[in-house]
Image: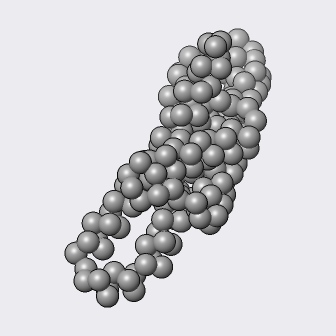
Amino acid sequence: MGRSRERSFKNYLAGAALSFSVVLIMTQAVALYLGGLSEEEAMGLGDLAFIIMLIANFVGGALGSFLVARKVGEDHLQVGMVTAICGYILESIFFLFSGEGPSSDALIIVSLLIGGAIGSLFAKAWDEKRSLAEKKAVETTQTPGKSQGVEGQQTKEENTLFRTSKY
């Protein structure tokens, strides 16, 4: 296995683990809350627990895909989808071995994939914004007339100020 393929697999696995960790934390929080209720009250909140599970899958997919797509830096949507699918596989394996059975509901898969797509699109927008800011920074340092020193260069104070500012 090549070094780049190994690194890519580690990125996808890390994104899937992050995606699943959000789902696991929310699942455990809902179980903790519903554990203190009577059986009739818990049955009435079954739909709410499912909606929370869908939201957790969406947020987990978006967060994991966003971070992996930013790290990889190309083919954002494909990276987001692969990360979301890996997250679902990890989630299914965990729930299968925990005795709850695999989460085979289509809505869970769809929410994870939509979250992965949105997270990867945010990563693409983030990268484009950063590249535009870098391009603007290069143009700013090359424009004449601002500096008091050599024409076309900034003074040392202006250059230091620009480097320390965040965009």
Q: Percent position (x, y) of residue 158?
A: 57, 25
Please identify the quadrant where the N terminus is shown.
top right
Residue lying at the far left in this picture: please name it.
36
Q: Residue at x 70, y 11 (%)?
A: 150
Q: Nearer the viewer, residue 74 or 8?
A: 8
Q: Nearer the viewer, residue 65 or 89?
A: 89
Tell me: residue 92, above or below residue 55: above
Q: For this view, does 126 lie left or right of residue 48?
A: right
User: Can residue 34 be seen by looking at this rendering?
Assistant: yes
Q: Residue at x 32, y 66 (%)?
A: 31
Q: Nearer the viewer, residue 47 or 133?
A: 47
Q: Which scheme is used to colour this image of the protein?
A: one colour
User: Can residue 167 be seen by looking at this rendering?
Assistant: no
Q: Residue at x 49, y 46 (%)?
A: 93
Q: Residue at x 43, y 73 (%)?
A: 49
Q: Percent position (x, y) of residue 84?
A: 61, 47
Tell me: residue 110, above or below residue 157: below
Number of marks in picture = 0
**In which quarter of the view is residue 5 placed?**
top right
Tell me: residue 141, above or below residue 90: above
Please identify the quadrant where the C terminus is shown.
top right
Q: Percent position (x, y) of residue 132?
A: 73, 36
Q: Percent position (x, y) of residue 58?
A: 56, 59
Q: Nearer the viewer, residue 104 or 55?
A: 104
